[in-house]
Image (tube, grey):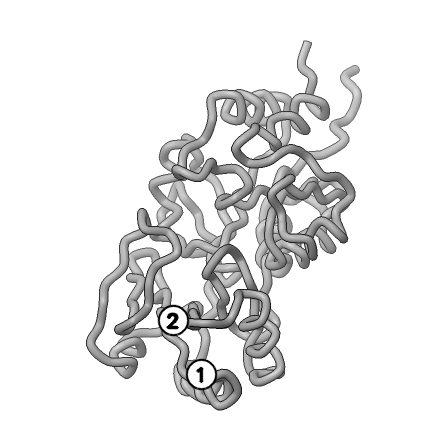
Amino acid sequence: MAAPLAYTLIATDLDGTLLRGDDTLSDRSRAALARAVAAGAQHLVVTGRPAPRVRPLLDDLGATGLAVCGQGAQVYDAGADRLLFSATLDRELAETALGKIEAEVGQVCAAVDQDGVDGLTLIEPGYRMPHPTLPAVRVGRREDLWRRPVSKVLLRHHALSDDALAAAARGAVGSLATVTMSGPGTVELQPSGITKATGLALAAEHLGLSRSGTVAFGDMPNDIPMFDWAAYGVAMANAHPELKAVADEITTSNEDDGIAIVLERLFPGR
């Protein structure tokens, strides 16, 4: 009888973690994931990207199962191209939160990810996308950001660092929304109480898997709730210091097959 798997669920962030800087997945990482899946584990993408921006990557991976998107606000079924779960940020509340933040730090530039499998990323004047490969539609006024329900708001400041902006936003917003920092130039507001951990827990329950069998990989502070939920958390060498501080292990960088190195140890094959 084969020994039981130490981990039955592999939860991976995308940017700065599974993907290289050019948005590609290395052959070594692809092979390591395939071997883990062949051994009986499930791979679950857990990302800040909204479902429409994740779909091409899932297609490339040949993934037809679930993915956690939008910082936990969406649980996406890739095979059916539908959302099993979706949480939206109240648009009036979002405007109020932006006003509170700007009262503290001055003008910010904002963008939104619209809800739904075909939702757009809208950016107001002055906002610059941190990932130039991700498509976005520029609107003329901030009011135009609220045309449809949104899953999150993205913020940038002309002078403050990401850490300083995130800290100021948390202080200003309080319980109105969850504030996360998910990458360079990416401070976000999402529905209160929604994190990668809440989305991961929902997806795991749907799959019949548990936190005790979950290993998680990430690189930014928005991955901290996911590490807290999972049995074992692995930070990349390029990870933010806050995530490294709570990680069970630090592997090599996303450019140096950090995930593959760990998975090759956990799933050595025959």
Estimate how packed mark 2 is, as few (under 14), some (14 to 19) or many (20 or more) residues with alpha carbons within 10 Å: many
Q: How many marks?
A: 2
Where residue 99 sits in the image (x, y, percent)? 44, 88
Instruction: Name the residue at 76% across, 52% down.
Output: 246
State the CA–CA distance, disc 1 to disc 2: 14 Å
Q: Is residue 3 left or right of residue 44?
A: right
Is any part of residue 93 visible from this angle?
A: no
Q: Foreground: 76 or 158? A: 158
Helix, strand, or loop for circle 1?
helix
Picture quadrant of residue 221: bottom right
Is any part of residue 105 visible from this angle?
A: yes
Residue 59 higher or lower than 69, as above or below: above
Q: Amino acid at mark 2?
A: Val
Where residue 265 sits in the image (x, y, percent)? 71, 22
Q: Is residue 149 left or right of residue 219?
A: left
Q: Foreground: 104 or 76? A: 104
Q: Amino acid at mark 1?
A: Leu
What is the quadrant of the C terminus in the image?
A: top right
Picture quadrant of residue 208: top right
Where residue 82 sits in the image (x, y, percent)? 38, 53
**Mark 1 highlights which residue?**
98
Instruction: Name the residue at 45% across, 51% down.
Output: 76
Tell me which label, 1 or 2, sits earlier in the chain. 1
Residue 131 higher or lower than 150, as above or below: above
Q: Is residue 106 left or right of residue 10?
A: left
**Mark 2 highlights which residue?**
150
Determine the residue located farthest toward the top in the rendered image: 270
Helix, strand, or loop for circle 2?
strand
Residue 140 higher or lower than 225, as above or below: below
Instruction: Name the residue at 49% across, 68% down.
Output: 188
